[in-house]
Amino acid sequence: MTTTSPHTPAALREAFSHFPQGVVLIGAEVGGAPQGLVASTFTVGVSLDPPLVSFAVQHTSETWPLLRTAPRLGVSLMGRRQIDTTRKLAAMDRDRRFDGVDFAVDDGGALTVCGTPVRLHTRIHGEVRAGDHDIVLLEVLGIDSVPDTPAMVFHRSSFKELVALRLSA
């Protein structure tokens, strides 16, 4: 039996939680300090020419105003080996998020987490206001990818390992 809920933020969150989403860290070194935000609203393949990806960030984010000033941003697709790291990076304590996290910063200031399945080096292409979020378009300038490295997803309000099912013929 299906139920229809009133249009409330709680009902929307519950409905949206059924859709698994990839998890990324958007990061940069700003003023000599590592900054980053975890996003499960990442979209690949927005455009191939120019190569664009996107993510959505809440207007209430305290980290995005810092990151948006960086000339380059790193995007790390978090893998199953980074579930605990992702929880730490998503914590509210911005000053301690990167304690014990193995990360690299390129010459443009883009910060990426070492050992993740995919690392993108990007710059901001544009922003669009969308309700209580902004949709940020990022132009991909470089890609580091490790084939056959399992990713993770955010599903039903928690980080989970992405497991491939093999169906027999």
Image: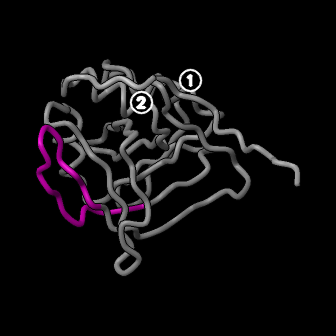
**Amino acid carrying mark 1 in the image:** Asp
Counting from the top left corner in percent of width and height, residue 73 is at 34, 54
The residue wearing badge 1 is: 84
Which residue corresponds to the image point at 47% horizontal and 41% vertical from the top-left? Answer: 21
Q: Is residue 14 magenta?
A: no
Which residue corresponds to the image point at 48% horizontal and 33% vertical from the top-left? Answer: 154
Can you name the residue that lies furthest to the right here?
Answer: 169
Give the vertical position of 96 relative to 147 (above or below).
above
Counting from the top left corner in percent of width and height, residue 38 is at 38, 36
| Closer to the camera in the image, 21 or 102 | 21
Residue 17 circle label: 2
From which residue to which does the magenta span run?
121-137
Give the vertical position of 10 relative to 129 (above or below).
above
Which quarter of the picture shows residue 126? bottom left
Which residue corresponds to the image point at 42% horizontal and 48% vertical from the top-left? Answer: 111
| Closer to the camera in the image, 76 or 42 | 42
